[in-house]
Amino acid sequence: MKKFQVGILIIFVAVVGFIVWYNVSQKTDEPTTGQTLHLGLNPWIGNGIYHIAKEKGFFSAEGVNVELQDYADGAVGKQLISSDRVDMLSLTPETVVVLKDAGIDVKAVAFTDTSEGGDGIIATQNIKTLSDLRGKKVAYEEGSPSHFFLSYLLDKEGMSTKDLQSVNVIAPDAGAAFVSGNVDAAVTWQPWLSKASDRQGGHLITDSKTNPILPALVIFRTQTIQERPQDIRAMLRAVFKAREWALANPDEANMIMAKAFNISIQDVKDQMLDFRWFTYEDNQKGFTDGSYSATNLIQSAGDLWLKLGLIKTKINASQLVDSSILKNLE
């Protein structure tokens, strides 16, 4: 009898142990309460989706704590993530390359949006083509998306920024410098592209609609990806849901973005014409495959940066992209 009771007890303990193990295993993809994801954002209109997700409670609904930290230029963003003050940056392919070369361990995990005319090159009347930029005074921010965009296009013409008189300023200041007549051309974004005509003879040479090489990548520190994949998935779910809400409620969404970026609602409307937010389905189809995948664009940026002497070591883009976060997101 005692042996029978002991056997029952052993079976009972085993069953309870299995139930406990199963419940714990099923919670591994739930957001971690009490921890905060710190997101570093530059003043690009596409990043408005994070402000919308925060304002409308999409992050909270997914059970993830998020803090948004705005910064003005790429150098500040690099400092923030290198010092662990932010977990993520939302920037273009060359950023991953620059961070890797600086010894900062990061990976791209998703797309959020892409510039479709929101970035471009404006110039004076006598500059008709990219080759006409030779010897001219051109404003752009070194090491930035603008620099990558310009260098990518010049390389196709057999040129580099060494063929120009470069003026290193951040993108908004580059646009202002052109409109005020201080430079012959500028690589900038909206609303400065639309303001090119404010300068007599000013016009657009080319833009990111013709050359779609500037998707915004969600770039996380590798340590955060390893330790908190569930929080990153929750964050992305919130962002994709915020996109649907913003498209269905454009007036309120525009107000949120205007406040976040300290610009007018009309400026928001103008900038919204020149980019699009990606869906989860877009990511499934194009994040790792195709000509404009994260892997291909990061590799192109790395090869070009190495050629120009802006990084020291050749990169392998496949090691800088982590598609595991996108799997089983929903």
Image (cartoon, rainbow, N blue to C red):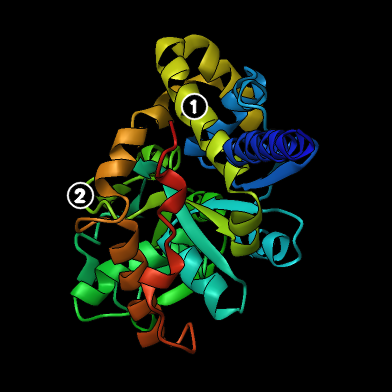
Q: Nearer the viewer, residue 143 or 95?
A: 95
- Which amino acid type is marked by label 1? Asp
Q: Which residue is drawn at 58% across and 53% down?
A: 89
Quick one: label 1, few (<14), some, or many (20+) residues within 10 Å? some
Disc 1 on helix, strand or loop?
helix
- Which amino acid type is marked by label 2? Thr
Disc 2 on helix, strand or loop?
loop
Q: Is residue 291 visible?
A: yes
Q: Which residue is drawn at 26% across and 67% down?
A: 153
Residue most extreme to the front: 1
Q: Can residue 73 be seen in this view?
A: no
Left or right of 104: which side holds 287?
left
Determine which residue is flagged by label 2: 210
Q: Which of 222 and 266 is in front in this view?
A: 222
Say whether disc 2 or disc 1 marks the residue closer to the N-terminus: 2
Check whether the beta carbons of the residues at disc 2 and disc 1 lie within 8 A of each other. no
Quick one: label 2, few (<14), some, or many (20+) residues within 10 Å? few
Q: Position of residue 156 (x, y in %)?
A: 19, 73
Determine which residue is flagged by label 1: 267
Q: In the rendered view of the protein, which quadrant contains the N terminus?
A: top right
- Above/below status of 248 relative to 302: above
Left or right of 35: which side holds 74?
left
Q: Position of residue 139 (x, y in %)?
A: 47, 64
